[in-house]
Image (spheres, rainbow, N blue to C red):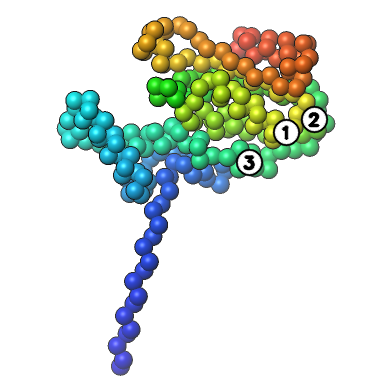
Amino acid sequence: MAADAPRSPRPPRPPRPLRSARLDAAGDPFDEAGSAADIGGDRYLEFENLVRRQLELLGEEPTRDGLAKTPSRVAKSLTWLTRGYQMDVADVVGGAVFDEEHHSMVMVRDIELYSMCEHHMLPFFGKAHIAYIPNGKIVGLSKLPRIVDIFSRRLQVQERLTEQVAAAIEEVLKPLGVGVVIEAYHLCMMMRGVEKQNSKTITSALRGAFRDDAKTRDEFLRLAHGPSNPLR
């Protein structure tokens, strides 16, 4: 019986992308859990080494028990916290835009957001209030918080974040108007620098009817800044 022919070696697999940057079938980002091998790739190893070197520059010993896994944890955590760079508005909204003859304001308020200041890489967090006036089309309500996540999960300044959210909604829906208000606390002001614990930053972006019509603008701002009462 003839001997089997030797098998040709398999070509090497390309490095797997960072897991937390991908979306599942429902448009949800995967969570950050997983082994180093699961995230893998040269990019991940470089990230780990940079964190390890930061610890050394701070005067710490990266190999001690409490810090041995910190470079891996930080690499995973920062990849998760900045996953918005890998997300796209069109992909997240998908087919959730519907024809509807509704011409009054639609508002989703008190949307929690978490982001990172690009100046000090410290968190800022708060709430977004979004409203639009449809022009023949509406979007699934859950897509508005997802749009906030796309832009908040990046290195940001609050002013730009507010404008980006408004611009994305305007591009998706072509509405008669868009209004976005963001209220946030910045740790770069609270735990360093001026150390002011109760200072809240409020930014707004008003487009179309929200900018040009005083009554529409006043209604939106009254609803955005009014008390938030739980449903009973």
Of the residues shown, which amino acid type is indicated by label 3? Ala
Secondary structure of the residue carrying tag 3 is helix
Dot 3 or dot 1, earlier in sequence? 3
Q: Which residue is mark 1?
A: 173
Please indicate whether residue 116 sits to the left or right of residue 27 in the image.
left
Question: What label sits on residue 90 in the rendered view?
Answer: 3
Nearer-N-terminus badge (3/2): 3
Q: Say above or below: 135 vs 126.
A: below
Tell me if label 1 and label 2 are in contact, CB under 8 Å: yes
Residue 40 position (above or below residue 213): below
Give the amino acid at mark 2: Asn
Q: Determine the CA span between mark 3 and mark 1.
A: 11 Å
> For this rendering, which residue is in front, 146 or 89?
89
The answer to which image quadrant residue 59 occupies is top left
Give left or right: position of 224 versus 24: right
x then y, percent, for residue 180: 64, 20
In the drawing, what numbered circle is on residue 120? none
Q: Are marks 3 and 2 in contact (CB under 8 Å)?
A: no
Crowding at dot 3, Cα within 10 Å, few <14 / some 14-19 / many 20+, comes out as few
Residue at image mark 2: 135
